[in-house]
Amino acid sequence: MKNLIPLLRAAPGACAMGIALFVTTTPAWAQTAPQSTQEGDWNVVAGLGVLRTPIFPGASKSQIRPAPYLSIDYGDRFFVRGPVVGVNLFRFGQNDRFRLGVMTRITPEAEWDESDDRALHGLGKISGGIDAGVFGSYRTESWFAELAATRGAVLRKEHGESSTRGSGTAVQLGFGYTMRLASHLRWMTQVSTQWADATRTRTYFGVSQAQSLATELQPYRPSAGITSYGVTTTLNYAFGKRWTLTGLVKYERLTGDAKSSPIVTANGRTNQVSTGVFLGYQF
């Protein structure tokens, strides 16, 4: 397998979390990369899509935005999936079904500003996030399982002061199934969940004393635990010799201390839905 999970993905919502993001985000990592139509080790697909995603993790409102898409494979070792860059370091087992590797990703889906929504007023701004970590996967012709652990950092601005902070550790687990519905049509679905340490949970769902005074929300220091679970499904249609059209839908539900955050209970919601469509061209 040349790619990994979606989403996300990913920041608080990941694997949807997807270790792909939808993440984000981009089409699921778990999708098989298009078969190369050219000689050589490189396989490149580029395109553009439109995403409708929550304004922030736990938001009650969504935003629609353009989303460029890039997928690159070099042999069966190096890959790029949108904001994710990874390397398969070890392959073993029958037909190399087990994979272990390293990856890094930017987290655009985790960026938000207090001006984006009334629920964020007084909470400052988060931008410039990046995660890095390790992954493992197992895949058959139809079934796959994936596990990733990442640690990140974000640029946070509060009360006019900016600082780079560790955004904690997240562990994403996903199980999925993919099948070919027709000669040019492939379907994939994946269930996933994410565990986050206290630092990660407080980065996106905590309320400090200063933020409490600015927002009238109660101070909140969430602990480590499972923050979300969900399901992602994608449909990929290949046409012509080099074009692909991908649609995706992701449902995610916040749980644990993330669900109980005043940011969510006051003006947000625990059920999160994201949709998107991408058009890609294979070079």
Image (cartoon, helix red, strand yellow):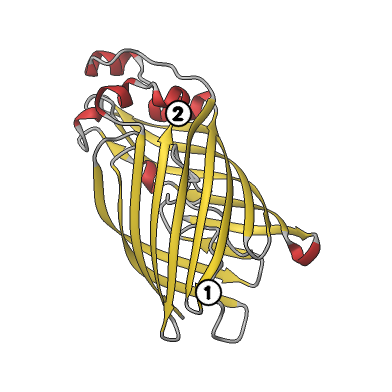
**Which residue: 39% across, 37% down?**
155
The mark tally for this picture is 2
- Is the residue 211 above or below the residue 102 in the image? above
Looking at the image, the residue that sits furthest to the right is 93
* Secondary structure of residue under mark 2: loop
Residue type marked 1: Pro
**Which residue: 45% across, 86% down?**
241
Looking at the image, the residue that sits furthest to the front is 181
Q: Which mark is residue 255?
A: 2
* Secondary structure of residue under mark 1: loop
Q: Position of residue 198 (x, y in %)?
A: 51, 23
Sooner in the amino-acid sequence: mark 2 or mark 1: 1
Q: Nearer the viewer, mark 2 or mark 1?
A: 2
**Which residue: 38% across, 48% down?**
108
Q: Position of residue 150 (x, y in %)?
A: 57, 41
Q: Nearer the viewer, residue 19 or 127?
A: 19
Q: Position of residue 232 (x, y in %)?
A: 45, 51
Q: Nearer the viewer, residue 259 or 142?
A: 142
- Is the residue 45 above or below the residue 78 in the image? below
- Is the residue 124 above or below the residue 20 in the image? above
- Report the Cα–Cα distance between label 2 and label 1: 35 Å
Residue 57 in view (yes/no) = no
Q: Position of residue 96 (x, y in %)?
A: 75, 63
User: Mark 1 highlights which residue?
Assistant: 34
Assess disc 2: are there few (<14), some (14-19) or many (≥20) residues with their C-alpha within 10 Å of its C-alpha.
some
Assess disc 1: are there few (<14), some (14-19) or many (≥20) residues with their C-alpha within 10 Å of its C-alpha.
some
